[in-house]
Each structure stands twice: as C-alpha cells, then as structure tokens.
Image (tube, grey):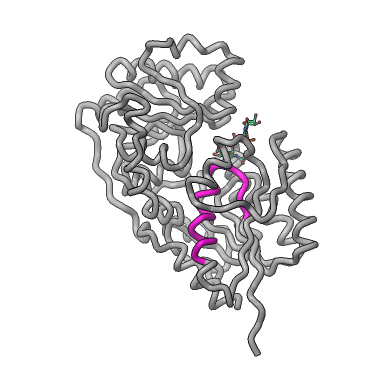
Amino acid sequence: MSRSPLKVFLVCGARPNFMKVAPVIKEMRRYPSAFSPFLVHTGQHYDYRMSEIFFRDLELGKPDFFLGVGSGSHAQQTAKIMAGFEKVCLKEKPGLVIVVGDVNSTLACSLVAAKLLIPVAHIEAGLRSFDRTMPEEINRIVTDSLSGFLFTTCKEADTNLRKEGIDGEKIYFTGNVMIDTLKLFVKKALRLNTLKEFNLKKQDYALLTLHRPSNVDGRESFESILKALKKISKSIPILFPVHPRTKKQIKLFNLQGYFPAKGGIRLTKPLGYLDFLNLTANAKFVLTDSGGIQEETTFLGVPCLTLRKNTERPVTVTEGTNTLVGDNTLMIFREADKIIGGRYKKGSIPQLWDGKASQRIVKILKTRTT
Ligand code: UD1
C-alpha cells in the first residue's frame, strides 16, 4: 500500500535563510511521492530588500505560509514567531519541520515543533562561536538540542555536537547548502551589469557589510572600525550596502561625517542575492561581520576580513581565505594593506562544499522518514 507524501515545513525568516532553504525545497520537489514541501516565511525580515528580492533572485516562488511577525525585542520577536507558527502547525500537522541557520526564526520554530512532537531537522547544525553574548549562539545551541536530524557543513561541527552529548546517529556531515545555491546562480550573477551600475572595476574595490549588534550598537567599536575603513578607502574604494540596523545607528551616533559625498566609502541600499554575489566575486577583498559571507568568499577564493573576534566557521580561517580582525583599527588596516600589496594568504575549498549538499540531505531524509 503506498503512503501519502510526508508533509514538510521549511522555515525561513531572515535574509541569510533564503539561500539555504532554496536548494533543499527544490530538491524535495523532485520526489513528489515522498515529500510534500511547504515554505513557511515568518516575516522576521520584511523590507523588500531584506526579503522579497531574494525570493525573486532565487526563483523561490511565493511562501505557502507567511506569519508577518516583523521586528521587536528578542523575546517579543521569538514569542510572536512561536505563536504564529504553532497555529499553522496545529492546523496543517506537518510530519517534519526543517530549520536553517541561527536566526530567531530558527530557534522559535524548532521549539514549537519539538513541543508538538514534530521531528526537527537543522541544516547548518553544530557551528559554535563559543561566545554566548551573540544571540545566534544561543539559537544554535537550543536548536541543535531539539533536533532529530543535524546536518553539518564541516567536521568541526560534528565534534562540537558530540562534545555536547548529542547522539552521533543524529549527526550527518552533508556539506554546505549555501554553496549549492552559489554554484547554481554564479554564472547568472556574473552576467549582470552590477559593476557598471556602481562604476567599479573588477578587483579594484572592497565590499563591506556590517550589522552585528556588537559592532554597530556601541559607538566605540563602530567608530574603531570606521577609522580603519576611512584609511583603507584612501587606497581603494569601498562599497557599503547598509543594513537597516546600521543605518539607524549611523544616524543615532551622528557618524555621517565618515561618509562624505565624494569620499572613498560609498553607501548603498541592501542588495539582492545576484548583485551581491557579482560584487563579491569581483571584489579585491571583502570586509564583513556576517556569517555566510565568510563561507562564500572562501568558496570563491576572495580574501575576507571578518570584523569579529571569533567565528563559528573556523574552517574559513584554517582552510579558506578568512582572517579575524575584530574591531581593532590597526589590525583591520594592516590585513587590508597585506591584501592590497599582494601579500595575503591563498585558501582552499573545504570538504563537501561541492554543490551537492541538498541532494545528500534529501536522500537521507527520504530513507529515514518515508
Ligand atoms: C538578523 C539575525 C542575524 C543575521 C541578520 C542578517 C537574529 C537574532 N539575528 O539580525 O543573525 O545575521 O538578521 O540580516 O535573528 N529591520 C528593518 N527591516 C527588515 C528587518 C529589520 O528595518 O526587513 C530593522 C529593524 O529596525 C530591526 C533591526 O533592523 O529592529 C534588526 O532586525 P532583526 O531581525 O531584529 O535582526 P538583524 O539585525 O537583522
């Protein structure tokens, strides 16, 4: 007797989630007799440029369920997501909930599912910065402890999970789904006229992202970074797509003076996936405090200076092109100078970052759940 397909909810909510769910839902749709996948968007991010543009760029279609939770304090946002997600789960009764990454939507939806006894699969499990002042670290630890399937991007993540006492049978080293998306879209991205639009030349600019509360919510660290950027921008132009949180903080601290109209740091709105990928691939180097960009630059072989003291993605430092520079003005400038002077290290691509992670994940879920 044939069974009906397993109803699967794939959760996304914030900008770094969309490129992680995209390849998994596409792969699941290839097996309609095994899976009936639904995309649930919590609405944690809601600006067109933080959310909808990614659905367009990644050819994701519209979400099946939209919770529209918006911003708030951590407790408020998490609570709103939980209440909204519980309602949909009670009505729709999914047989599996897939969460990705480490944002508040990841935590909230895994908590709801676990309490309703719905199995949870976490993609990008086991990453640890060992810094509990980062909200994402709390989200990672809790989500992993609730998940029945833990799909990891690197061997270090497997070790972290085992050290926390998680049963090895639940851990699967499957590779990096974000690299699946990158490989799928990089040709399309490189055909765009992004460089022309920003009047930039290949290998002749740096790309910057900055939004972590630890960097932009305190004036001291924010200014320490800006001082380094100002100095770097005398040698090479810096393009800076500004996150909404950062935009607010620039205003609050009155830091507009760092960005004069004809200066070396050029501000722009947050960009879509394809334009940003084009700019990353063509950059001389990237400065960032994001998680995923550390991985994308490693895959592309583009030097990356991470404006943080730690990383949950150490493989990008040990094997890839990444260096941690914190918010230290001197260190940021020194490493940038090495890159500009051609004295920076070369990296290699970590194991299983080959574009096939979602195939491996779906294959495992197929044998274990259906
Ligand atoms: C969230 C994630 C972070 C991820 C980042 C990528 C958590 C805990 N953090 O941080 O891991 O790196 O997304 O962007 O989940 N805002 C808008 N429009 C939007 C979204 C946010 O204006 O579409 C503003 C709001 O004022 C909001 C602030 O940005 O209060 C921060 O948004 P929030 O979702 O709380 O966290 P992020 O800083 O974006």
In the rendered image, the residue lying farthest to the bottom is: 1
Check if residue 12 falls in the magenta segment: yes
- Residue 234 point in image, percent of width and height: 30, 15
Residue drawn at 39 percent across, 31 percent down: 287
- Residue 46 point in image, percent of width and height: 64, 38
Residue 233 appears left or right of 116: left
Residue drawn at 28 percent across, 50 percent down: 348
115 w.r.t. 53: above or below:
below
- Residue 244 point in image, percent of width and height: 58, 28
The C terminus is located in which quarter?
bottom right
Q: Is residue 300 visible?
A: yes
Asked whether 76 or 170 is in front, the reply is 76
Check if residue 45 falls in the magenta segment: no
Which residues lie in the magenta part?
11-27
Asked whether 67 or 228 is in front, the reply is 67
The N terminus is located in which quarter?
bottom right
Asked whether 81 or 202 is in front, the reply is 202
Residue 224 appears left or right of 219: left
Residue 276 appears left or right of 3: left
Q: Quadrant of ligand 1?
A: top right
Residue drawn at 58 percent across, 64 percent down: 166
